[in-house]
Amino acid sequence: MKRLFESYQDYFRVGAAISGIILMNDEEKASLFEHMKARYENFKKNFKPKPEFPEFKFPEPQPYPKGDMPDKELAANQFNLVVAENECKMGSIYRQDPDGQPIFDFKAADRLRDFAKKNGQDMRWHTLVWHNQSPDWIFKNADGSKVSPEVLEERLKNYIFTVGERFRDDICSVDVVNECISDKNFVLRDGADRSQWFDILGPDYVDKAFFWAKEAFPKSSLVINDYNLEMVPGKREGMYKLLKGMLERGVPVDTVGLQMHINIEYPPVSEIEKTIELYGSLGLNVIVTEMEISMYADREQDNGIFEERKEYTTELLEKQAARYEEIFECFKKEAKAGILKDVVLWGITDRMSWKNNFPVPGRTDAPLLFDGEGKPKPAFDRLCGE
């Protein structure tokens, strides 16, 4: 089998998000399965119907297969860049001991770093500051009240510098701030829009995080990462205005991350090209950080219209392949122009994709380059020129 990253080595690195599950041994996978079963039962017990989820349709978790999953070998052989899907997020690492002191758990992050080193791969860090998957304790005093800006700032600074001290020589790029632009008004997401960082620290938290990250990761590119920038013109422009102001203030942001969670119909390649070139006009690099192409042309913004489960026919797989090829041709053009540096796929096999059961419970998807058994799909063959 031809190696994917070799097909693009003259243009950009090709990476994949790695689920920590594929690096676990059988005992760890069995323990995780038991934990997931308990969470599922608790979730089912406390489920409250919503307009978008009127019924509980989430499938029960299934045990992971023993031995190495196909994702592991593919991760090692097909990509020259890796990033943790969840294991390097703050909530997975930054914890409190019984006395309320911060402690760090780097076991899973170390494992991915060691995997990357063994396979001669570069590694990204995702992510330092995000309104999701941050531990609740970081925003609270011992009595449950909201912490002061001074306390939260010190906790964040401690986190960034501790991570940097351990990984600074191993990380090529860092998602410093993730998903900070609001979908409602296209400015910084505030407390009413689920950002406790903004709520307590105000808008300056973005600038400060980048200044600290520059010290903590002096060798890494510093990325601001968000979704739908290639889909929603207002959000794209909102990010542009934020970045322009940051650059004028001397904030050391050098890269924009486009998550690129797109689908088989939308957006048109012209919008992707426009987005990359807009941020390139600021003198910034652009990377694609979380790409997949869903088989479903859902229009969540249009009153939550979701497609029914499809059969993944030969015709549909070929359509997906053509879409991947067309977009990667755009990426090659923007790499030649000196703007685009990396393309990272958010997962490896369809079986492990986060798009299964999201946004529609009980509906699978097939958005990646390898099927559930790890076999290459037409999209992989097309990208490798086979």
Image: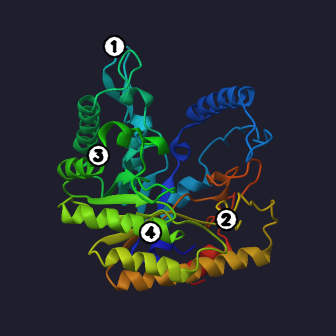
Task: Read off the residue under disc 1.
Answer: 99
Which residue type does callout 3 highlight? Tyr
Task: Please name which of the two marks, 4 or 2, marks the residue nearer to the observer.
Answer: 4
Q: CA distance from mark 3 to mark 4?
A: 21 Å
Q: Which mark is residue 375?
A: 2
> Disc 4 vs disc 1: Cβ atoms closer than 8 Å?
no
Which residue type does callout 1 highlight? Asp
Position of residue 117 in the picture relative to residue 75 (left or right):
left
Within the image, what quadrant is residue 280 found in? bottom left
Residue located 36% across and 85% down the image: 336
Q: Mark 3: which secondary structure?
A: helix
Residue located 73% across and 48% down the image: 52
Residue 59 image point, x, y percent: 76, 41
Task: Read off the residue under disc 4.
Answer: 236
Q: Mark 4: which secondary structure?
A: helix
Residues packed near mark 1 inside 10 Å, few (<14), some (14 to 19) or many (20 plus): few
Task: Please name which of the two marks, 2 or 1, marks the residue nearer to the observer.
Answer: 1
Q: Mark 1: which secondary structure?
A: loop
- Total count of labels: 4
Task: Read off the residue under disc 3.
Answer: 205
Which residue type does callout 2 highlight? Lys
Q: Earlier in the sequence, mark 4 or mark 1?
A: 1
Position of residue 102 in the picture relative to residue 228 (left or right):
left
Residues packed near mark 2 inside 10 Å, few (<14), some (14 to 19) or many (20 plus): some
Can residue 20 be seen here? The reply is: yes
